[in-house]
Amino acid sequence: TAFFFVLNHKNTPHHTVDENLMALWQGFKATYGKKYADPDFEAYRIRVFAQNLKRIEGDETKGITQFMDLTTEEFKQTYLTLKLKSTEQPITIHSKDEPTYVDWVSKGKVTKVKNQGQCGSCWAFSTTGSVESALILAGKQSKSVDLSEQELVDCSTNYGNDGCDGGLMDYGFQYIIEKGLAQESEYPYTATDGSCQDTSKFKKVNITKFADVPKGTCNSFEKALAQQPVSIAVDAEEWQFYTSGILKKCGKQLDHGVLLVGFVQKGDDNANAWKVKNSWGPSWGEKGFIYLADGNTCGVCDSASYPVV
């Protein structure tokens, strides 16, 4: 992360803590281009920032992110909007099979990390990400393919999605099967709910169907992932301050749609980890990606699907 520190209240004079805090605050504002309407509102955000610094203290995977001035509730309301109930089905970590390692990013089959902004459209980015990868793998598009999340936000409400207030990847896939999907350049992203444009003049991409990965074991996810990147639902509450490393502690209330792009070995001890592409921009996490500990961390093995082109 760009900057990080630990508040040590016992040994640090109060004015030094304040100076440290304000230096970090100014750095945070400069790094992420933060502006606040008035001094009272900024003072409140500084208090939230200070509380969040205490929360991440001692956790080597956490640091200062663009969400540092948000409470947990604010973060969840804006960014964690997937419309999905969590499953109670038990998950087996691994069978006797050897793990299948794959990294679709290093293979050049994953498109650039995008930023959903202050719109609960994670589901649309997970949908486009998996369709983009499927098209690249099928030789139908180049790695520069960039599909329109905004079309899904504006036009797929009749399929069960709710624009910036949340949705599901499967509903997005169903829309693309029936209507196709425009390129980003033709239907650009605005991070707000808009009225559905006439897309008949656009050159659209299509998929033929989508498949849900059978629940039950993380092995079935590895097998699906060995074919192509997979859209998944996760519990991302612990992701608010993630900066690097393998995240091990996480809940399983599925509230965020992302793209599973790898099962890799990471770190000095070559620990197994899921590699996940997020939609919070390349400055978040490890260049826009997060690594989750092997097994059903954050509910990674609870709900997944992928498109067939």
Image: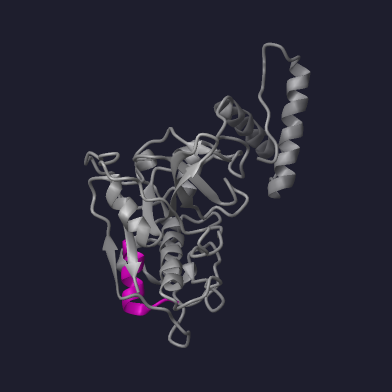
Residue 218: % across, % down = 30, 45
Residue plotted at (55% across, 59% down): 113
Q: Quadrant of the N terminus?
A: top right
Question: Of all residues shown, which one is farthest toward the bottom?
Answer: 201
Residue 160: % across, % down = 31, 63
Q: Quadrant of residue 304?
A: bottom left
Q: Quadrant of the C terminus?
A: bottom left
Q: How is the image coloured?
A: one colour
Segment tinted magenta in the rendering: 170-181
Residue 250: % across, % down = 41, 35
Please tell me which residue lies in front, 136 or 163.
136
104 inside magenta stretch: no
Tell me: residue 220, above or below residue 308.
above
Tell me: residue 126, above or below residue 32.
below
Residue plotted at (32% across, 46% down): 301
Image position of 111 (left or right of 96): right
176 inside magenta stretch: yes
User: Of helix, strand and loop, which mostly describes the magenta segment?
Assistant: helix
Residue plotted at (71% across, 46% down): 31
Residue 106: % across, % down = 53, 58
Tell me: residue 156, above or below residue 105.
below
| Visible residue check, residue 30 | yes
| Visible residue check, residue 167 | no
Residue plotted at (37% across, 69% down): 156
Please tell me which residue lies in front, 25 or 8.
8
Image position of 154 (left or right of 21): left
